[in-house]
Each structure stands twice: as C-alpha cells, then as structure tokens.
Image: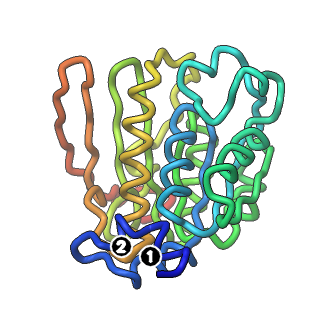
C-alpha cells in the first residue's frame, strides 16, 4: 500500500468511499475565511482528511484571549499573524497539503482574488460585512458556502448554494452591529468540525446534508433543531 492510501486507510475503507473519493479530496481546493475559533477546527479537519489545497485568510494577530479556543495558535505565537501560526501548525500535521496564507481583511474589492480557484468557501468569520462579501463571491463563482456561527453554548451551520438552496444574503439580508462573542472552545470545535464534514462531503462527491437547511445546536441542553431555508425571490444577490 502506498503512503497516500496508507495514511487515509481508515476513511478510504468507509462504505461508499474508496480511493476515488480520496483522490477527489486530494485534488480539491478550499477557501477558509478566518482561522479563529471556527477556522482552527475546520482547517485541521480538512488537512487530516487530505484536502489537497487550502487557502486560509485572516488579517488578525494572535491575542491571549484567543487561546481558550483557537488551538492552531500557542502562547509563543502571541503577536504573530494568525495565518502564519495556523499554516505552520497545519503543515506539521500534514506536509503533503498545499496551504496558501493570506493575512488580509476580506472586502468586496479583494474577495474574488482571495478565494481564487477554490471549489468551496468555509465561513468561519465573526462579522457580517466580510460574510456578505464571501457570500456574494460564492454566488458569482457558483460554489457552495458552508456557514458556521457560535454564541456562547449555541451554534449553527448551513450550506448556501443557489439555485438549489438560498444564498447567505437571502437569510441574512442585513448586517447586525458587531459585538464581542462569548464562546466556549469546545463549542467552536464542535461546530467547526461539523462544517468540515459538510465540506468533505461535497469535495469527495458525496451529497451535502445541510443544503437549504440550518442546523441549530444548543449545547447547554444538547438539543438540536432544523430550519428549512428558502431562496428570497427578491434577493439582490442571487435572484
């Protein structure tokens, strides 16, 4: 067995997977918007699964307040660019993955070039100005956007991909005022890991479960509910 199949043997042997799905992952490209609380588990799980090409984007530097949840960064990384410490941590786990780091703020003007030729976008952001920019980019490029968000012990995930499902702006047409988000690290790990699962489904050629649905998780009660999401016929982005 060659190194590639040996490394991913435990997932290649899953029912319905096989070497073909693994090869699709190896040649796929994902754009991760933010390598903070959600972006850390998203990026780590995609690297572990063997997604071959990652583009990670975050303009922030590591702060001590990040360390309760952002496990790609350590105490010695305080003050360093998050993209730099994240890239280093990810490559130490899987040196066969290509990781391009963009220490830039996402804007409507630069988002298309930052996303580049990615097959999927993962929304691991904490502000809706940038979220709307990547949502509009996803529509223009015709690729899915895996949205994740947390607040305290609550999390949510949805996959936006018109025309089969609404776009992000159909569901969140207005950007709320930015606020500091209270959060437990285990919650961001759980939500980010579930975002990564949806991305792996898509990139491996498997059905995506949450296209057109939002999963809302209350981890304080370990309860889950779903909302059906419909396109807005008057949406200025995807209609």
Q: Is residue 105 above or below residue 188?
A: below
User: Residue at 62% across / 48% down in the picture?
Assistant: 33
Q: Is residue 100 left or right of residue 122?
A: right
Q: Nearer the viewer, residue 67 or 8?
A: 8
Q: Is residue 35 left or right of residue 15?
A: right
User: Residue at 56% across / 49% down in the picture?
Assistant: 43
Q: Quadrant of residue 212?
A: bottom left
Q: Which mark is residue 22?
A: 1
Q: Is residue 185 left or right of residue 39?
A: left
Location of residue 47 in the rendering, given as x and y in whole percent from the top left corner: 56, 57
Location of residue 223 in the rendering, given as x and y in whole percent from the top left corner: 16, 28
| Secondary structure beneath label 1 | helix
User: Residue at 72% across / 20% down in the picture?
Assistant: 75
Q: Which mark is residue 184?
A: none
Earlier sequence position, callout 2 versus callout 1: 2
Q: Which residue is disc 2 drawn over?
A: 12
Q: Nearer the viewer, residue 174 or 153?
A: 153
Q: Is residue 228 left or right of residue 100?
A: left
Location of residue 121 in the rendering, given as x and y in whole percent from the top left corner: 54, 58
């Amino acid at each position: 067995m060659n190194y590639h199949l040996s490394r991913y043997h435990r997932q290649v042997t899953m029912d319905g997977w096989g070497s073909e799905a693994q090869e699709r992952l190896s040649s796929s490209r994902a754009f991760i918007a933010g390598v903070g609380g959600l972006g850390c588990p998203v990026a780590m799980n995609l690297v572990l699964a063997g997604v071959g090409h990652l583009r990670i984007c975050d303009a922030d530097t590591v702060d001590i307040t990040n360390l309760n949840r952002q496990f790609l960064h350590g105490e010695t990384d305080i003050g360093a660019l998050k993209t730099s410490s994240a890239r280093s941590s990810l490559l130490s786990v899987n040196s066969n993955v290509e990781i391009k780091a963009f220490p830039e703020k996402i804007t409507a003007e630069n988002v298309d070039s930052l996303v580049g030729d990615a097959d999927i976008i993962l929304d691991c952001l904490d502000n809706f100005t940038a979220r709307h920019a990547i949502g509009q980019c996803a529509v223009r490029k015709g690729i899915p956007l895996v949205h994740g968000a947390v607040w305290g012990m609550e999390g949510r995930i949805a996959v936006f991909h018109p025309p089969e499902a609404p776009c992000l702006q159909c569901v969140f047409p207005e950007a709320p005022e930015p606020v500091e988000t209270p959060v437990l690290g285990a919650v961001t790990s759980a939500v980010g890991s579930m975002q990564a699962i949806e991305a792996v489904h898509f990139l491996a050629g498997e059905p995506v479960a949450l296209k057109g649905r939002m999963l809302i998780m209350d981890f304080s009660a370990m309860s889950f509910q779903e909302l059906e999401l419909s396109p807005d016929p008057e949406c200025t982005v995807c209609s």
